[in-house]
Image (spheres, rainbow, N blue to C red):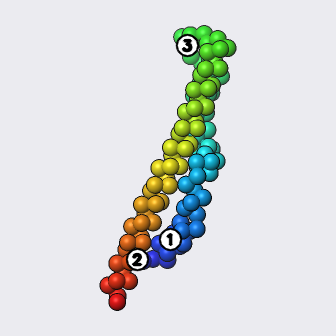
């Protein structure tokens, strides 16, 4: 095992429960979710660039903003849950490798 693997094991043992909480996942995933949703919002705000776009009333725009907010939150939480699962899988593989190494050295 490398020192990077050992450092990851120590980090993940200390932080895995904190990173599993959905509020933490939302907090860390929200910036990328906003980057994901920002082009959609800009296309609605700058409507003049596409001349054949139909008129959107204020209530329709509110619905679009609510849907966009839902997309951003879903993307942020889903991405961070996926990242947590990848880290958890890596942690379990490294622990199994570490146990295998200690068993073979005894």
**What residue is disc 1 on?**
9
Residue shown at 42% from the left, 60% from the top: 89
Q: Is residue 78 among the parts visible in the rendering?
A: yes
State the residue position of label 3: 53
Residue in the image at 36% along x and 81% along y: 101
Image quadrant in which the C terminus is located: bottom left
Cα separation between marks 3 and 1: 52 Å
Q: Nearer the viewer, residue 23 or 57?
A: 23
Q: Callout 3: 10 Å neighbours few (<14), some, many (20+)?
A: few
Q: Of label 3 and label 2, which has the lower sequence position?
A: 3
For label 3, the SS is loop
Q: In the figure, residue 51 lies in which quadrant?
A: top right
Q: Residue at x 54, y 72 (%)?
A: 10
Whether the residues at callouts 1 and 2 have beta carbons within 8 Å, the answer is yes
Picture disc at residue 98: 2
Label 3 – label 2 distance at C-alpha: 59 Å
Position of residue 79 measured from the top left corner of the image (x, y, whole percent): 51, 46
């Amino acid at each position: 095992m490398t020192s990077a693997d050992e450092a990851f094991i120590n980090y993940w043992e200390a932080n895995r429960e904190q990173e599993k909480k959905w509020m933490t996942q939302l907090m860390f995933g929200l910036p990328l979710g906003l980057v994901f949703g920002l082009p959609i919002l800009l296309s609605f705000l700058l409507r003049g660039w596409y001349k054949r776009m139909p008129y959107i009333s204020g209530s329709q725009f509110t619905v679009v903003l609510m849907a966009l907010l839902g997309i951003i939150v879903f993307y942020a939480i889903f991405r961070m849950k996926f990242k947590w699962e990848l880290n958890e899988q890596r942690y379990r593989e490294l622990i199994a490798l570490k146990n295998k190494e200690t068993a073979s050295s005894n």
